[in-house]
Each structure stands twice: as C-alpha cells, then as structure tokens.
C-alpha cells in the first residue's frame, strides 16, 4: 500500500483494542520484520487494526506480505518463512495452533 492510501486510516481501532505497551510491541515486531498475526472475531475491526498497524510504522513502510483478512482456506500461508502481517478470524485460531508455525507475534485484538 502506498503512503497516499494510508492517509485517512485512523489509529483509533488499534489503540482502542490494545494497551499502549502492546501497540509498542507490535510496532517493534513490525520494525524487526517478524511474522505478525492479528486475531479478531470481527472482520471490520480486524481489517481496521491491520491497516492502523501500517500507519503506526510511518515514516517507514511495510515492504512484506500484507493480508488484512486471510481466508480460512489459506491458513497455510501463516507457515511462510518470510515476514508478514496478516489478519485471521478468531474461529481459525484452533487450526493455527495445530500448524507447525515458526516464531511469530500473535496479537488478539479482542483480548488485548
């Protein structure tokens, strides 16, 4: 996503869902190019938080895989060996736990 596309993205959904220290941990994970999986039971909030995470990075820009809402049938993408920022519906968490995932950062938007 280009910078212009993020100009009107609000940060409120992210800061309303997470404590500030958790937002800072998310920021650090993105700066260190980790695998980040955002989880929520609400698709709209999940997408809003994913885009807000990109805005938090400014003036830097995420150069890796970005999928605000990953369809359940593509969960295998979470095992990819490269940095990514993906949003996953909470109903898919049990399937994620069964996957052989490498180190990653999991952010549950519903539970902070």
Image: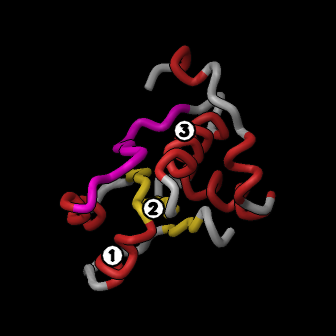
Q: Mark 1 points at which residue?
A: 96
- Against 7, residue 97 (above or below) is below
Q: Mark 2 points at which residue?
A: 37
Image quadrant holding the C terminus, namely bottom right
Q: How crowded is mark 3: few (under 14 residues within 10 Å), some or many (20 or more)?
A: many
SS assignment at label 2: strand
- Which mark, residue 48? none
Looking at the picture, how far across and down is residue 34, in whole percent? 46, 59
Category of crowding for the residue at label 1, using alpha-carbon neighbours closer than 10 angstroms: few (below 14), some (14–19), many (at least 20): some
- Residue 54, compared with residue 97, is above or below; it is above
User: Of label 1 and label 2, which has the lower sequence position?
Assistant: 2
At mark 3, the secondary structure is helix
Looking at the image, is 64 positioned above or below residue 90?
above
Q: Is residue 57 visible?
A: yes
Image quarter hosting the N terminus? top left
Highlighted magenta segment, given as a residue range: 61-72
| Residue visible at 42% across and 60% down in the picture | 35
CA gap between label 2 and label 3 equals: 13 Å
Q: Are marks 2 and 3 in contact (CB under 8 Å)?
A: no
Using the image as rendered, state which of residue 76 and residue 17 is in the foreground: 17
Using a 10 Å C-alpha cutoff, classify the residue at mark 2 as few (fewer than 14 neighbours), some (14 to 19) or many (20 or more). many
Residue 80 in which image quadrant: bottom left
Q: In the figure, 28 relative to 58: above or below? A: below
In magenta segment, residue 88: no
Report x, y in % for residue 9. Answer: 63, 28
Contact between labelled residues 2 and 1, with CB atoms less than 8 Å apart: yes
Q: What element carries label 1?
A: helix
């Amino acid at each position: 996503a280009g910078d212009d596309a993020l100009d009107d993205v609000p940060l409120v959904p992210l800061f309303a869902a997470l404590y500030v220290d958790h937002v800072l941990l998310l920021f650090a994970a993105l700066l260190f190019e980790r695998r980040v999986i955002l989880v929520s039971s609400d698709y709209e909030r999940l997408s809003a938080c994913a885009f807000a995470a990109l805005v938090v990075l400014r003036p830097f820009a995420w150069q890796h895989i970005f999928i605000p809402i990953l369809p359940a049938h593509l969960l295998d993408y979470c095992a990819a060996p490269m940095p990514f920022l993906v949003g996953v519906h909470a109903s898919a968490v049990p399937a994620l736990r069964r996957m052989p995932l490498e180190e990653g950062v999991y952010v549950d938007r519903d539970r902070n």
